[in-house]
Image (tube, grey):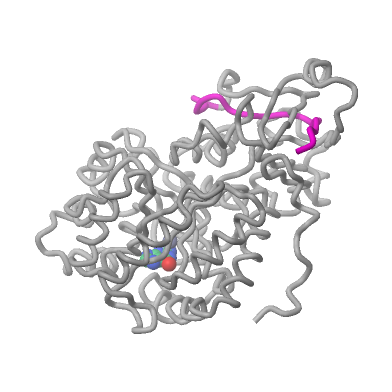
Amino acid sequence: MTDVLIRGRVLTFVREPEGIDDTRAYRYYEDGAVLVANGKVADVGSYADVARQAGSSVRIADHRPNLVLPGLIDTHLHFPQTQAIASYGAQLLEWLNTYIFVEEQKFKEPQHAALIAGRFMDELLSNGTTTAVAYCSVHPESVDAFFTAAEERNMLMIGGKVMMDRNAPEALRDTPGQGFDETKHLIGKWHGRGRAHYAISPRFAITSTPEQMEMSRALVAEHPDCYVQTHLSENKDEIAFATSLYPEAKDYTDIYARYGLLGRKTLLGHCIHMSDREISVLAETSAVGVFCPTSNLFLGSGLFDRDRFDKLGARHAVATDVGAGTSFSMLETMDEAYKVLHLQGQRLSPFNSFYMMTLGNARALDLEHRIGSLYAGADADIAILDSRAKPAMELRMRVASSLAEELFVLQTMGDDRCVAEVYVAGQPMKQRREGPAKHLA
Ligand code: GUN
Ligand code: ZN
């Protein structure tokens, strides 16, 4: 693949910032460049240094004065809910039954699944998101559509077939045996193919019987290199229902612990109404709590307590949770994250926000050796951000005087219009976005 030298203001993190003044947590090159060769980052630094090493024949993509960042990472969303965003007026269980369990039935149809999967990937890319962890529907066809669309774009994507064998419409239920067999088949087909990773996905304790949880345990034991994704403690009615179904468990977290589902590769959506005991179990098992701010506000679920996760040493990540989440944009997600934390007296510096969307989420996935930061050897997944993309932003930026201020403007006012370009394994993707969906179902 041809080499390209991407020029702009390069920003990449090397560790979690300890505060707004922690300049050693990141590298920032005002006139910087990223040299890409064969889909990988070959060099990062000042433009003068990198250009000298690249030689005079290299093609230059000049993105000045825009920012050059690692591609953004979304650690929890639902691809079959792409057309169910903005479904009015209900809390979690009613919202699932009224809207989501109707919508997801459409994904039995491979053509529909393929159409939405393509649009879903393009929507992620146009928001600067190059890697995401997604739930597919219960239908294996939806997983094929998901990974096919990712493969066509060469995106590093993580996903899996939802398993549900109760408390859902018959058309969306599998059985413990079927969930096991289909998941095993899909892992064999997709996990490790190109940039694909599989996530074993029992939806949540409410929709899986103890038999299906046992089957999930067996899948995880047989495939320790796969991710595991489920939901935990999002909503008070959900917690009461889940714990009533598993009376032997100490609490909601203990349900998953008893079935061996908590480990370093486990991603637990929401984790809002948790005791110290439960958060400590996540810390002990290295499981990751996933903060989904737009979703938690939209469904009226509650406020994620990041400081308690940090105090108790539990890992956490951040995500859109489309379609309860109201935007595909990680910028808009961090805007809401800031507000959710602010309401609880917790601070989120702009540097911490940008760390979380990039290296922080890569670390939560144990993928920091490939994505989430720009250094020689990393995958060349890159987002180009324009902090003056909207007239009101341009006006605001006229009086901004620091990088911290610019990042805060980007997260507070920004959206997909601020993503000037996105590169996947070194290839520019924004212009290949499909046109309006004339043929959309
Ligand atoms: N809990 C179980 N399924 C879902 C889902 O699809 N969205 C959200 N927000 N929570 C869930
Ligand atoms: Zn979810």
Q: Residue 291 placed where, x, y %?
A: 44, 49
- Considering every residue shown, the one lying at the far left of the view is 248
Ligand 2 in which quarter:
bottom left
Left or right relative to 148: residue 42:
right
Q: Which of 306/420 is in front?
A: 420
Q: Answer whether residue 13 is magenta in the image.
A: yes
One can see residue 260 in this view = yes
User: Which is nearer the eye, 62 or 67?
Assistant: 62
* Rendered position, 57 above or below 309: above
Residue 106 vertical position relative to residue 233 in the rendered view, above or below: below
Look at 50% across and 59% down and name the residue there.
77
Q: Left or right: 119 with respect to 344? A: right
Residue situated furthest bottom in the rendering:
170
Residue 371 rendering spot, x and y as whole percentages: 57, 37
Q: Taking the image as drawn, is residue 300 in sight?
A: no
- 16 left or right, relative to 3: left
Magenta-tinted stretch: 1-19
Q: Quadrant of the N terminus?
A: top right
Quadrant the C terminus occupies: bottom right
Q: Position of residue 323 (x, y in %)?
A: 52, 66
Q: Residue at x 24, y 36 (%)?
A: 284
Query: 362 and 250: which one is in front?
Result: 362
Image quadrant where residue 185 sits: bottom left
Residue visible at 65% across and 47% down?
A: 412
Is 14 inside the magenta-drawn segment?
A: yes
Q: Residue furthest right?
A: 56
- Tell me residue 196's x, y (percent): 52, 50
Where, by quadrant of the figure, is residue 302 drawn? bottom left
